[in-house]
Amino acid sequence: MDWRHRAACREEDPDLFFPFGNSGPALLQIEEAKAVCRRCPVLERCLEWALEGGMDMGVCGGLTEEERRAVKRRAAREARARHHQRVSGDEPGVRGGQEGGRPTEFARGADAQG
């Protein structure tokens, strides 16, 4: 059975999940929609689907469209940072042949020989 058949929103008015705006009365509607999402047994799968491009508008997976866009932006930034680390060879505490701000040889004690 498809996960959507178990979704709590199937028993609700679909308009609840598509408020007009994000202030005033729409805020109450958004909170009501999110309350339905919080009791949904497939919340995580729904959010995953929405983030993968299944839903661009309204409340889906417990988040508004703006919140989902923020999650996507954050994930993209983190992916770029990981990619940059792999490509540049940077690791936390190791930058450009240095460890702890000192040349690698000094940090490893190479200058202490002699």
Image (spheres, rainbow, N blue to C red):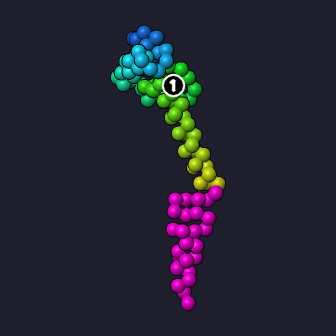
Q: Residue furthest bottom?
A: 114
Name the quadrant containing residue 40. top left
Q: Position of residue 18 (x, y in %)?
A: 48, 15
Can residue 57 be seen in the rendering of this structure? yes
Q: Which residue is pictured at 64% across the width and 54% down the height?
A: 87
Q: For the residue marked with disc 1, what is the amino acid?
A: Glu
Q: Please check the rendered image and state whether residue 11 is part of the magenta-colored stretch, yes or no.
A: no
Q: Which residue is pictured at 53% across the width and 20% down the height?
A: 57
Image mark count: 1
- Residue 75, placed above or below residue 61: below
Front one among 28 and 98: 28
Q: Which residue is pictured at 61% across the width and 68% down the height?
A: 97
Front one among 45 and 69: 69
Q: Which residue is pictured at 47% across the width and 21% down the height?
A: 22
- From which residue to which does the magenta span run? 88-114
Name the quadrant containing residue 104. bottom right
Front one among 46 and 60: 60
Q: Residue furthest front?
A: 24
Q: Please check the rendered image and state whether residue 98 is part of the magenta-colored stretch, yes or no.
A: yes
Q: Position of residue 98 (x, y in %)?
A: 57, 68
Q: Position of residue 21 (x, y in %)?
A: 49, 18
Quarter of the image for the C terminus: give it.
bottom right
Front one among 83 and 27: 27
- Side of 48 where 25 appears, left or right: left
- Residue 87, placed above or below residue 27: below
Can residue 1 be seen in the rendering of this structure? no
Q: Residues within 10 Å of mark 1 (few under 14, many from 20)?
A: some
Q: Position of residue 64 (x, y in %)?
A: 47, 25
Name the residue that disc number 1 marks: 65
